[in-house]
């Protein structure tokens, strides 16, 4: 059995790619394979509205959509291998499936902390099933320990505080989000969480977990020797790309030290003929010459458009793309345009103790704009990031 275009991974990137194929006028077969039993769903609400019980439906498209667009959606179907010479993939049931073009969109899986004991009440958050379990346990929780103050950890801390659960947030780095936004902005994020009553502990990790006689988590011993009580623990220490099924395929992968993922060019072509990669799993070539993964919701759609254009033989767009991401924490939407880096120079333009705006620059050129609770001021600077704009010009204009 074979299908002209097979997309492995029925998350946002896989769905967007299937949609773009139809939008571009492709009329051949499209097979979308997902290893989960649930149709494609939106992940950002899982750490916010869903876990707080404000919504139950995170489905991206109703079932009839796939019939209308003639997209074959096959769920509960894991892929275990690929033979790029024969142009076949192997499914978990041992059967083979041929393809003319293969698109890898398998996304990420949560990273686990090695050495921690296996006890009840300890969670990760990536899949819908994870969020369902976490929401059920949150209802009876009093004290939560969140390990890792990245975006997921910070968003969950905000959601748990909204549920009136006491939160201890532990982060080995000097501030929350330090590896993404740098310590200066991380300090402003830390202030917001402390203002909301979060017991934020930076520069410290978790040594081990404590449990009761029933095997339920009751707290943790931290690396500084202190102890914290908790009847609910979430490990949010990042994710790793799902590429194990590509072992032996010859498809080139990025080194784990460089973030891992499937190496691809600026439109998603991999090292293997007729094989493409898109979304969180894909380490695309960027304008800087570096190939890296970008784990942002908006990039999945942007990559899907570029990939489909190239796959169908069209010309890639020449307009500069300005990356965008956001994170909702408490009543504040943190938004960023561009490519902020901890190594950049950071200028805080405004800060009222809650909302703030900052410019990132490198060698005097604006690289990113980040705002908390200042949507209009962030978004109006998109055009400035599409060209080489001296940050000094923006600061002068701001008075």
Image (tube, helix red, strand yellow):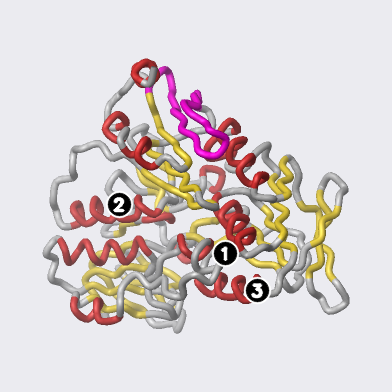
Residue 103, quarter of picture: bottom left
Residue position marked by numbered label 1 in the rendering: 125
Q: Residues within 10 Å of mark 2 (few under 14, many from 20)?
A: many
Mark in the foreground, 1 or 2: 1
Residue position marked by numbered label 3 in the rendering: 139
Q: Tell me the distance, in whole angstroms, between the alpha carbons under discs 3 and 1.
A: 16 Å
Is residue 354 highlighted in magenta?
Answer: yes
Labelled pair 1, 2 in contact (Cβ < 8 Å): no
Q: Secondary structure at mark 3?
A: loop
Mark in the foreground, 3 or 1: 3
Q: Residues within 10 Å of mark 3 (few under 14, many from 20)?
A: some
Considering only order in the chain, which callout, 3 or 2, is on the residue closer to the N terminus? 3
Kindly identify the residue that appears in the image at 58 percent across and 41 percent down: 189
Q: Which residue occupies the foreground of this view, 29 or 390?
A: 390
Kindly identify the residue that appears in the image at 86 percent across and 73 percent down: 212
Mark in the foreground, 2 or 3: 3
Left or right side of 292 for 178: right
Q: Main secondary structure of the magenta part?
A: strand
Q: Tell me the distance, in whole angstroms, between the alpha carbons under discs 2 and 3.
A: 38 Å
Outermost residue to the front: 352
Left or right side of 294 for 28: left
Quarter of the picture holding the C terminus: top left
Q: Secondary structure at mark 1?
A: loop
Residue position marked by numbered label 2 in the rendering: 303
The stretch in magenta equals: 344-365
Q: Which residue occupies the foreground of this view, 17 or 92?
A: 17
State the image coordinates of residue 48 (x, y, percent, origin top left).
52, 61
Quarter of the picture holding the N terminus: bottom left
Q: Is residue 35 above or below residue 342?
A: below
Kindly identify the residue that appears in the image at 46 percent across and 75 percent down: 56
Q: Tell me the distance, in whole angstroms, between the alpha carbons under discs 1 and 2.
A: 24 Å
State the image coordinates of residue 69 (x, y, percent, origin top left).
19, 75
């Amino acid at each position: 059995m074979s299908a002209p275009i097979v997309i492995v991974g029925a998350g946002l990137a896989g769905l967007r790619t299937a949609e773009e194929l139809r939008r571009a006028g492709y009329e051949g077969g499209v097979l979308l394979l997902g290893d989960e039993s649930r149709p494609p769903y939106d992940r950002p609400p899982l750490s916010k509205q869903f876990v707080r019980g404000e919504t139950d439906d995170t489905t991206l498209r109703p079932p009839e959509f796939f019939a209308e667009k003639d997209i074959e959606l096959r769920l509960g179907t894991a892929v275990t291998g690929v033979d790029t010479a024969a142009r076949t993939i192997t499914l978990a049931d041992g059967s083979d499936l041929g393809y003319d073009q293969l698109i890898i969109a398998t996304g990420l899986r949560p990273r686990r902390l090695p050495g921690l004991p296996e006890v009840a009440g300890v969670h990760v958050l990536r899949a819908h099933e994870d969020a369902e379990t976490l929401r059920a346990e949150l209802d009876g929780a009093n004290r939560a320990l969140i390990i890792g103050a990245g975006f997921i950890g910070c968003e969950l801390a905000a959601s748990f505080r909204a549920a009136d659960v006491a939160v201890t947030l532990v982060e080995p780095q000097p501030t929350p989000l330090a590896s993404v936004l740098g310590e200066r902005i991380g300090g402003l994020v830390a202030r917001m969480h402390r203002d909301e009553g979060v017991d934020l502990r930076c520069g410290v990790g978790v040594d081990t977990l404590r449990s009761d006689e029933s095997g339920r988590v009751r707290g943790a011993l931290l690396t500084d020797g202190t102890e914290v009580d908790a009847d609910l623990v979430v490990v949010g220490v990042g994710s790793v790309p799902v590429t194990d099924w590509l072992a032996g395929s010859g498809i080139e992968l990025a080194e784990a030290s460089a973030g891992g993922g499937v190496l691809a060019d600026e439109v998603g072509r991999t090292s293997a003929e007729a094989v493409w990669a898109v979304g969180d799993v894909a380490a695309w070539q960027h304008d800087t010459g570096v190939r890296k993964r970008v784990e942002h919701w908006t990039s999945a759609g942007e990559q899907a458009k570029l990939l489909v254009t190239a796959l169908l033989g069209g010309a890639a767009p020449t307009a500069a793309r300005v990356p965008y991401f956001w994170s909702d924490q408490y009543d504040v939407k943190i938004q960023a345009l561009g490519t902020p880096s901890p190594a950049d120079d950071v200028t805080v333009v405004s800060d009222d103790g809650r909302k703030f705006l900052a410019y990132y620059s490198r060698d005097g050129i604006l690289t990113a704009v980040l705002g908390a609770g200042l949507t209009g001021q962030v978004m109006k600077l998109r055009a400035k990031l599409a060209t080489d704009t001296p940050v000094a010009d923006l600061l002068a204009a701001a008075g």
